[in-house]
Image (spheres, grey):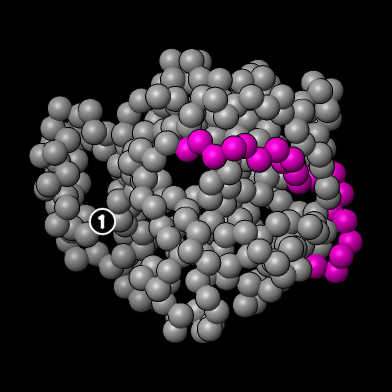
Amino acid sequence: MRLKYRYATVMEKDTGKSKKIINILEKYSIKYKYEEENSILGFYWSLIFNLYEDFASFKEIQKKIKSYGLLEQISTEFDKEDMDNAEWYVIYALPCQYPQPEEDWEYVKLTFDTDNWCPYCNVGKIQNKPYKLMKEPKQKGNQFWGLFWENDAIFCREEIKNILEREKIQGIHFIQPVRKNNTLIENYYQLIIETVLDKGFIQNNTESIICNRKNYDKKKYKLDLKYCGRVKFAHNQKGGYMFEKRIFFSKSDFCKSNEYFGSGWNADRLNIISKKVYKIIIENKLKGLKIAPIFHE
């Protein structure tokens, strides 16, 4: 596996920083993407590049560019050996739109049972109705897709539903999303994952966030409710997720973690697939998912 640091400046006003950063990148033969735009508000620029922690001069390069205030995103790239050796995998569907209605998070009460839901940390809601969406997804090249705000929601085209049913994949059923006017979105389905695993997450490089006064300001949320005191985990994306092997006894090919993950208001259980599902995705070259192997101690 490799740790990747992605740096980006998007549509910022150019003060000469771009040329200085590019000079650093070219000195170390770092590939980058650079675009210019001349708008009515002035001259703007966009610069995007990646650094890998295994570069011989990584720390030296990182130190030189740190003063320019670029947005840094850390992720892990897994190699073929990591993927081939795993038996279970975490999956994320790439988002393309927001659940409806958006105003004041109204979609939550229209889509979920909120009896055990905490509006501070967002833990505990249970979906009991189809998502309402603005329109059909436009990502024609992807067979899977997801939503902003709700990272554990996974949707697919009818062809994927047929493949998973033909292969007798266990642990899921399908429902159709609806438009804002409650009409069905034809030929698109949400995968409803039925199995929740036992607790077994191994807290490695992961921050625990407790729902309490320290982490959630009541004034910001404009609520006067009790904090629930539950815990979720904020993974820093350095390395993969680690779980105890004993919890993977289920015959289901799709599972959800017992634990919640996210920071701020985000809180989702991880979607987990078996090696059988992973092979189906790879063999059929299905797109729209990010996949990471699960590790064990």
Name the foreground residue: 156 vs 109: 109
User: What is the three-letter code of the residue carrying label 1?
Assistant: Leu
Image quarter (top left, top right, bottom left or bottom right) of the N terminus: top left
Q: Is residue 194 magenta?
A: yes
Please rate how many residues cluster around mark 1, counting C-alpha atoms within 10 Å: few if below 14, some from 14 to 19, many from 20. Answer: some
**Magenta residues?**
180-201
Image vertical order of residue 179 relative to residue 74, above or below: below
Residue 180 placed where, x, y %?
A: 80, 67
Residue 89 placed where, x, y %?
A: 55, 29
Image vertical order of residue 108 relative to residue 151, above or below: below
Name the foreground residue: 62 vs 214: 214
The residue carrying mark 1 is 70
Residue drawn where x is 21% and y is 55% of the image: 18
Q: In the picture, residue 119 is in which quadrant?
A: bottom right
Please state if 82 lies on the left or on the right of 214 as rendered: right
Image quarter (top left, top right, bottom left or bottom right) of the C terminus: top left
Residue 149 placed where, x, y %?
A: 57, 59
The answer to whether residue 163 of the structure is visible from this angle is no
Residue drawn where x is 36% and y is 63% of the image: 11
Give the main secondary structure of the magenta stretch. loop
**Total tally of numbered discs in the picture:** 1
The answer to whether residue 199 of the structure is visible from this angle is yes
Residue 171 placed where, x, y %?
A: 75, 33
Name the foreground residue: 3 vs 168: 168
Q: Is residue 74 magenta?
A: no
Q: In the picture, residue 131 is in which quadrant?
A: bottom right
Q: Secondary structure at mark 1?
A: loop
Residue drawn where x is 64% and y is 77% of the image: 103
Name the foreground residue: 244 vs 173: 244
Residue drawn where x is 36% and y is 50% of the image: 207
